[in-house]
């Protein structure tokens, strides 16, 4: 299987399998990268924090105005922190999608290299020792008195 192909296999459940569309993972990662770039351009926590600052006396020079300014500062700090956390989460999602796609591609390449066909066009060219042992065991009649081979 090559780049952008589908991988299938057993997940260990009863007859259950998985289907991975590597190109869809790559597309998702690209879309998230664009989202992250747009986010950094317009809503980056540090930049938004810098643009949203107001002077200490913006609401006035009396006690209530000072309290409002303090609450505004607390809200502003919290918003910066949330935006930075969101940016980190989006970046992590993009990196994990890319890594997952790469891992599936590498596994597909490894599997394809191991499963070269023999000259007959249907058997494995270089079977592993464990598969050869299993095949031999299946060709040897059992001692249970059963005559089927």
Image (spheres, rainbow, N blue to C red):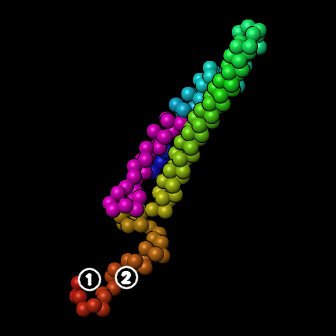
Which of the numbered marks, if any, corresponds to residue 55?
none
Q: Which segment is the magenta one? A: 4-29
- Residue at 34% across, 80% down: 138
- Residue at 60% across, 25% down: 39
Residue that badge 2 annotates = 137
Where is residue 54 shown, x and y percent of the image? 73, 13
In the rendered image, which quarter is residue 76 located in? top right
Q: Is residue 21 left or right of residue 93?
A: left
Mark 1 or mark 2: name the one nearer the start of the chain: 2
Whether residue 10 appears in this view of the structure is yes
Where is residue 74 shown, x and y percent of the image? 68, 25
- Residue at 30% across, 87% down: 141
Label tally = 2
Where is residue 44 shown, x and y percent of the image? 65, 25
Residue that badge 1 annotates = 149
Name the one closer to the observer, 50 or 15. Answer: 50
Task: Indicate the secondary structure of the residue bearing disc 1.
Answer: loop
Name the one closer to the observer, 112 or 84. Answer: 84
Q: Is residue 39 above or below residue 90?
A: above
Where is residue 86 shown, x and y percent of the image? 59, 32
Whether residue 87 appears in this view of the structure is no
Q: Residue furthest front?
A: 63
Q: Are marks 1 and 2 in contact (CB under 8 Å)?
A: no
In the rendered image, which quarter is residue 36 located in? top right
């Amino acid at each position: 299987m090559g780049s952008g192909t589908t991988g299938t296999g057993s997940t260990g459940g009863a007859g259950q399998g998985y289907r991975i569309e590597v190109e869809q993972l790559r597309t998702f990662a690209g879309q998230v990268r664009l989202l992250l770039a747009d986010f950094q351009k317009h809503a980056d926590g540090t930049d938004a924090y810098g643009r949203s600052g107001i002077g200490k006396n913006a609401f006035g020079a009396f006690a209530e105005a000072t309290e409002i300014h303090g609450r505004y500062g607390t809200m502003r700090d919290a918003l910066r922190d949330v935006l930075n956390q969101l940016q980190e989460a989006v970046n992590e999602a993009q990196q994990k999608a890319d890594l997952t796609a790469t891992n599936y591609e590498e596994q597909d390449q490894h599997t394809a290299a191991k499963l070269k066909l023999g000259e007959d066009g249907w058997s494995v060219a270089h079977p592993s020792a464990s598969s050869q042992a299993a095949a031999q065991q299946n060709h040897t009649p059992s001692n249970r008195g059963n005559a089927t081979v």
